[in-house]
Amino acid sequence: MRGMTNQQQIKHLTQTAMVTALIIVLGFFPGIPLGFIPVPIILQNMGIFLAAELLGRKYGTVAVGLFLALAALGLPILSGGRGGAAVFVGPTGGYLAAWLLAPVLIGTLLQRTHAAEAQNWWRELLIVWIAGIGFIDIVGAVWLAVQSNMALPVALLSNLAFIPGDLIKGTLAVVIARRVRSVVDFGIPA
């Protein structure tokens, strides 16, 4: 945080804490079990997209990292009231690990392509869909295959059930982030 005033540091930390709280709140909505894999459909991953879009790669990763640290310590903040270190080695562990890296990918691509600018909404949407949804679902499927002794093609195929909902959540995240950025100055580089 070199070169920042105390006021800027407080602003960034406050915004980071608010986005972390948003991710926690999105976990209050119960997951929808699919039955054929031990990973439910959840709303919480939309918070990961919003963290990247609103806070950029650095602070978005801090927000998600803080959230995951609290979950690892046992706070029941993951969807369905789950928490604890065991969750990170269970079937959803790959998705959680990918959540930590997604803000770096999304934030870097948003910055390099200037996709957060007004006329580039479609570019921002594609970045969230590919670097967010695609990355998280692939890493999650790979871990699911390893952890559950499932064939990788089967794990990848089972993730297709998440795609329609994830595309909606990704689109909502872009719409919400653009609206929030038009009203609130986050002042944080991607």
Image: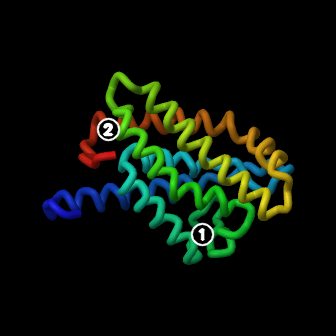
Q: Could you say whether the residue bearing mark 1 is in a helix, strand or loop?
A: loop
Label 2 belongs to which residue? 181
Taking the spot 67% from the left edge, 47% from the top edge, the residue there is 138
x then y, percent, for residue 22: 46, 54
Residue plotted at (51% across, 31% down): 126
Whether the residues at callouts 1 and 2 have beta carbons within 8 Å, the answer is no
Q: Answer with the quarter of the image where residue 21 lies.
A: bottom left
Which residue is drawn at the image coordinates 29% and 47% (left, top)? Answer: 189
Q: Is residue 101 above or below residue 190?
A: below
Disc number placed over residue 162 in the picture, else none: none
Residue picked out by circle 1 = 76
Q: Quadrant of residue 62?
A: bottom left
Q: Is residue 53 left or right of residue 188?
A: right
Compare residues 37 and 33 and report the one nearer the observer: 37
Residue 8 is situated, as x and y percent measured from the top left of the image, at 19, 57
Residue at left offset 69%, top offset 70% = 89
Marks counted in the figure total 2
Between 102 and 172, the one nearer to me in the picture: 102
